[in-house]
Amino acid sequence: MTTPERRVGRATYEELLRLSLERGFFFPSAEIYNEAPAGFWEYGPTGLLMRNNFAREWRRRIVRKDDMLEIDGSVILPRIVFEASGHLSSLVDPIVQCTKCGTRIRADKYISEKTGLQIDERLSPEEFQSLISKYDLHCPKCGGDFGKPTKFNMMFRVGVGAEDADSYLRPETAQSIFVDFARLSKTMRIKLPKGIAQLGRSFRNEIAPRQALIRLRELLQAEVEVFFNPAAKFDPGRFEKIKEVRLNILAQNSGSSQSKSQTASEAVLLFGGMEIISYYFALLQEFYEACGFPKEKTRFRELSAADRAFYTTSAFDFEVETSIGWLELVACNYRTDYDLKNHSKFSKKDLQVVDGENGKVLPHVIELSLGVDRSLFSLLDLYFYHEQDRDVLRLQPNIAPYLAAIFPLISKGEIESKAISLYENLKLEDFQTFYDDSGNIGRRYRRMDEIGTPYCITVDHQSLEDDTVTLRERDSMGQTRIKISEIPEKLRTLRDQRNEPEVQYNR
Amino acid sequence: MTTPERRVGRATYEELLRLSLERGFFFPSAEIYNEAPAGFWEYGPTGLLMRNNFAREWRRRIVRKDDMLEIDGSVILPRIVFEASGHLSSLVDPIVQCTKCGTRIRADKYISEKTGLQIDERLSPEEFQSLISKYDLHCPKCGGDFGKPTKFNMMFRVGVGAEDADSYLRPETAQSIFVDFARLSKTMRIKLPKGIAQLGRSFRNEIAPRQALIRLRELLQAEVEVFFNPAAKFDPGRFEKIKEVRLNILAQNSGSSQSKSQTASEAVLLFGGMEIISYYFALLQEFYEACGFPKEKTRFRELSAADRAFYTTSAFDFEVETSIGWLELVACNYRTDYDLKNHSKFSKKDLQVVDGENGKVLPHVIELSLGVDRSLFSLLDLYFYHEQDRDVLRLQPNIAPYLAAIFPLISKGEIESKAISLYENLKLEDFQTFYDDSGNIGRRYRRMDEIGTPYCITVDHQSLEDDTVTLRERDSMGQTRIKISEIPEKLRTLRDQRNEPEVQYNR
């Protein structure tokens, strides 16, 4: 019965992309135009529902759980914000331009590609110049000579008002939080430590955007900046709650390429004794597991001084192992008082706050900078699977775009009206459901399997007699009969009770 | 007991602004910097919670109710999109610049202000020139002569990539929907009529941004574009459901400045016989009423040909009466096939779809372009009220930032731990709640009244004996005792059951 040429196993990157394009997850922006530049993607209907579910879990398990404040700031910010933050001088890529055909490319990437050497992107223009001379490198397109290497700032400039005032699209949502901190600390009765969160867009003028949602020019971040007094002890009651959470940590000085599983309590030593870091790493770990990221596929990788962003003194990347290798999902940075100090200096405002009996303090900051697009891409990668006779996206019910589909066995008469009435009732209860009455039931199941719908409900002849329907489960394909009146409660339970991922995800 | 100088009645615009700034609703962007330009505002924690509630109702009562597809597109789009849409040539303001001091102002507004004449913003530069000469107008700042009037495009330009490719921040979310239509119609099994929705940011480089959330340079839109076949009859079953919904309509040729209440069925005549327009106006009307906009404070005002946007042949503004006059909340436009036709021409792609037995058709579009920021501002205006001895924001429970606050009568011992445990449980059930243990209970009530929290729950000595708490209602200030175990169900019922606004809003 099965087509013999069919490959069983996890999907390739190309197959994931096809799923995304053809089933409404995401697709290139303005794609009807050849002129549309790379690095801009749209969320389609299924992708957006999945993203909304992911955001709901983030709010539930990080923002609300930790009593953080969430804000939403403007994406256009005046030049002075980025003078203060350092992004104007430091968020730069080294580039060279061909003097003959005008092609511009990234100097570090090109030199590294041609020579096989590891090239630090932070070398000076002069150092790039001598490497280009030394290895006699020329334009890859026309063979022409390169001009002088320059620094290319990755922020998009925007001119505001009739006076064309210098402004930029923010390259991280974090800066909105730092410039709003004075207002929030004055009006929101903040007690340290306090997390301020934001889910929003950031923009980076990448020279070479790549791989769909992996490196975008317009990206979605869910960032948390936790303001705290570095001289104060972290609340033992809060630490107690997470101290047994296990984290996989790949430390710089471990002498191994394998991460080591440690409890949050044990890991404190790796964080310079800072319990607050362990606490937020544990929250992050639990959030990702609740979305279906298996712990054994994730790790916190410590960055070397050379790999860290310019504003951080200690940094770990939270990574997931995908079919295209380990992928950074969250940059966990200890930003110290770097940002508040600089904004205080440039704005000439005192940004200190009173920390109870400890008096006035300029808070330090721990950041969890989460890439939403990459996280969603990784979930598709972990859960899209070819079985012998179907493709199935085994997303957890709390993440899947649609929680349930409603099918009338035949699309007429009482069966149809009963199915529509069930569908309308479930919509009123805020369940995201899908109605499908076209093709045979088997085909409808396949369509739902492919976009990850965990439950399909069919209204049939028996439904007219006893008010029951079949409830079909995606992964086991098992069917049970259930009373229509019990469906809302049943769906709620199935969604909120976490699946055990052991048997489901792609290894 | 009351302070005699206290004014009872609705709040003024200045008082609304103070509430917004001091209680975390919204505040200017990057306000610690004097350099920050006008027209950019941030949502604070309470404003964002309120906005999320408003968005949830929009999804529930428009998007999901009508089985629309929702997408989320990039805000940066290439130049050709706006060549096709007409925004490059038509989204312009007339400006003049002083030759002496360089001040730039809007020509139409300034001439109208100085002469008392009605000036059409679409006059040609030559016509502005002759008006300036005729009335001998000079720079309001220095008295200098004006240079030649010019057209100022309101889109923000952005250069993409090392090649600095011409792109723009979208001035309406609608264009993402039009350029994505081909992909969606091909992959999402769309049947006409079909609504495609999007909630996202748009950007307009206003010369003179004003009044907080009323005219922003960075704004939030919730747009719906309904694609339909103008030759097909609208589904009678769907129309039947809304035909008795009453709309207040101010038609162009009515010869009156008062709107007239009509049923959706009666109103069809005003829409050139198009039932589909009546249907979507009725959905919109019901959505706004569900958020607490009293029907008698709203109207659909027909625009004259001179007032319509360049892409529309028939247009109504859905307006609300606020303390600063009638305010446009939603632009309801009949865009015909204007956008798809132009994108088809510029992209050389066939954007027609098959409409069942009617064959291939280039769909027409009805648009509901909703301003989220203005809608929220209007709600504050409608519901913030000074009573004799308190300020109270009487928002409905489905819109209020926090549904309930939890207070321990004293913040220690068993009372505190019981209150915390109740708070944690309500958070797990996804209720947005607030915990407050500082100051006496009366003060805590006042703080919650001011930000619109409809219910306050106090854990006291009796709670330790019988597991009951007091539930205090914001508007009546009445208190009842309720079992802790019954709270989640009670709060859910109170939130989902609509209040009758008659007694509450500001007249």
Image: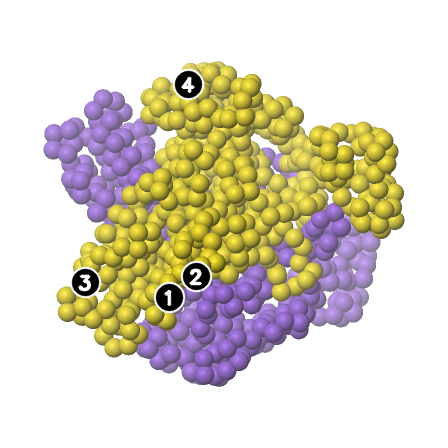
Chain colours: A purple, B yellow
Q: Locate residue B396, reporting x and y percent.
A: 36, 47
Spatial CA span between label 2 and label 4: 52 Å
| Residue closest to the eye, B75 or A139 | B75
Task: Give the quarter of the image for residue A345.
Answer: bottom right
| Badge 3 vs badge 4, beta-carbon distance below 8 Å | no
Outermost residue toward the left in this view:
A466
Residue visible at 37% across and 71% down in the picture: B438
Q: Depth-wise, is mark 2 or mark 3 nearer the camera?
A: 2
Residue visible at 40% across and 55% down in the picture: B388
Spatial CA span between label 2 and label 3: 35 Å
Q: What residue type is disc 1 on?
A: Arg
Q: Is residue B243 visible?
A: yes
Q: Earlier in the sequence, mark 3 or mark 4?
A: 4
Label 4 sits on residue: B266
Classify 10 Å Cα crowding around label 4: few (below 14), some (14-19), many (20 and above): some
Q: Give me the chain letter of mark 1.
A: B
**Residue B3, label in figure:** 2
Q: Is residue B296 left or right of residue A364?
A: left
Q: Give me the chain letter of mark 2.
A: B
**Residue B468, label in figure:** 3
Q: Earlier in the sequence, mark 2 or mark 4?
A: 2
> Which quarter of the figure is the C terminus of chain A placed in?
bottom left
Q: Locate residue B235, reporting x and y percent.
A: 38, 20
**Dot 1 and dot 4 within a common chain:** yes
Q: What residue type is disc 4 on?
A: Glu
Residue visible at 81% across and 49% down in the picture: B141
Q: Earlier in the sequence, mark 1 or mark 4?
A: 4
Q: Secondary structure at mark 2?
A: loop
Task: Give the quarter of the image for residue B232.
Answer: top left
Label 1 sits on residue: B443
| Badge 2 vs badge 4, beta-carbon distance below 8 Å | no
